[in-house]
Image (spheres, grey):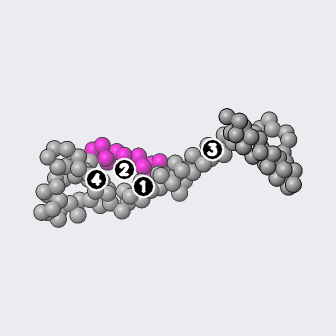
């Protein structure tokens, strides 16, 4: 799914949450009318004694939430990779193989010595 579609879907859910239908805990327990209304609005607020007690989310609403989370995780991974590449852009001395292994061991020894001295 394209980023624009994901954001549009998430925005639709966000808009519905702000202007959502409300149902009391008592109505939820005693009535089945909410089952027909939920697919139309995707999100319903559950009210108990005038305060929010929870949310009912339709399958499409949940899909929108999960798609948004996946999109944000992907964006976070891209931003993290960009930060790593940016931090290493001026690094010219790359190691590999035995040279990398020896440098890693030397770094561990130096850290261990530093911790021992502290």
Secondary element under disc 2, as helix, strand or loop, is: helix
SS for tag 1? helix
Judging by the rendered image, the residue that carries numbered circle 2 is 13
Q: Where is residue 49 shown, x and y percent of the image?
A: 14, 46
Residue that numbered label 4 is attached to: 55
Alpha carbon distance from label 3 to label 1: 24 Å
- Name the element at disc 4: strand
Q: Which residues are magenta?
A: 7-19
Q: Which residue is mark 1?
A: 64
Query: Mark 1 or 2 closer to N-term?
Result: 2
Q: Position of residue 53 (x, y in %)?
A: 23, 50
Residue 5: give its label: none
Residue named by callout 3 = 80
Task: Say above or below: 72 vs 86.
Answer: below
Residue 117 in picture, x, y percent from top left: 71, 36
Identify the mark nearer the N-term, 4 or 2.
2
């Amino acid at each position: 799914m394209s980023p624009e579609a994901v954001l549009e879907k998430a925005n639709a859910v966000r808009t519905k949450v702000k202007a959502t239908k409300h149902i009391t805990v008592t109505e939820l327990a005693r009535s089945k009318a909410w089952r027909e209304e939920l697919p139309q609005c995707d999100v319903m607020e559950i009210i108990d004694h005038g305060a929010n007690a929870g949310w009912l989310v339709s399958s499409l609403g949940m899909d929108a939430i999960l798609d948004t989370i996946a999109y944000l995780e992907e964006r976070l991974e891209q931003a993290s990779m960009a930060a790593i590449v940016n931090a290493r852009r001026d690094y010219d001395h790359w190691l590999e193989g035995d040279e990398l292994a020896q440098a890693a061991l030397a770094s561990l020894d130096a850290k261990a010595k530093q911790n021992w001295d502290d």
